[in-house]
Image (cartoon, rainbow, N blue to C red):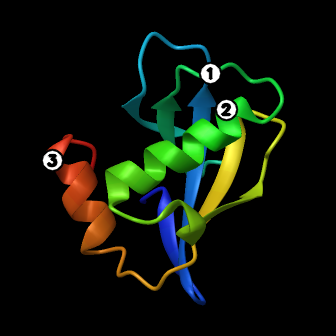
């Protein structure tokens, strides 16, 4: 299973964030409590006043070559488990796989 899925109008990405890391990075794929795969991300930003959420959007936009406005956090704004959605229509098999295969994740 992959931590992303195609949804109407875009792609949904299941994430597990670690704020206050030493650097922003993709840290692999983990399995959540419900058995769902999660993409693990480390972010330098602290989890206060939306800083980590803003950093998440910026990191995903840069990594996936999207505009920040094309990404929305759909749930988990106040927790470590988040669902992000790329609202621009992209094909998960091409964009996500090509970006993360380079990192040896999928």
In the picture, the disc for residue 88 is none
Residue 73 x, y percent position in the rendering: 70, 57
Return the residue found at the far top.
22
Q: Secondary structure at mark 2?
A: helix
Nearer-N-terminus badge (2/3):
2
Q: Which residue is mark 1?
A: 19
Q: Nearer the viewer, residue 47 or 4?
A: 47
Q: Toward which corner of the image does residue 27 lie, by quadrant?
A: top left
At a point 39% along the width and 81% down the height, the residue shown is: 90
Q: Secondary structure at mark 1?
A: loop
Crowding at dot 3, Cα within 10 Å, few <14 / some 14-19 / many 20+, comes out as: few
Question: Which dot, 1 or 2, sits closer to the camera?
Answer: 2
Return the residue found at the far bottom.
8
Q: Which residue is mark 3?
A: 102
Whether residue 38 appears in this view of the structure is no
Residue 15 x, y percent position in the rendering: 58, 45
Nearer-N-terminus badge (1/3):
1
- In the rendered image, the quadrant that contains the N terminus is bottom left
At a point 52% along the width and 26% down the height, the residue shown is: 43
Q: Which residue is mark 2?
A: 52
Whether residue 76 appears in this view of the structure is yes
- The vertical placement of 61 against 18, above or below, is below
At a point 62% along the width and 21% down the height, the residue shown is: 19
- The vertical placement of 102 against 41, above or below, is below
């Amino acid at each position: 299973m992959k931590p992303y899925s195609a949804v109407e109008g875009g792609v949904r990405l299941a994430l597990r964030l670690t704020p206050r890391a030493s650097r922003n990075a993709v840290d692999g794929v983990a399995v959540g409590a419900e058995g769902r795969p999660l993409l693990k991300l480390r972010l330098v930003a602290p989890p206060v006043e939306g800083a980590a959420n803003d950093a998440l959007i910026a990191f995903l936009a840069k990594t996936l070559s999207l505009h920040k406005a094309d990404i929305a956090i759909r749930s988990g704004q106040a927790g470590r488990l988040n669902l992000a959605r790329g609202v621009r229509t992209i094909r998960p098999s091409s964009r996500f796989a090509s970006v993360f295969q380079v990192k040896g994740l999928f």
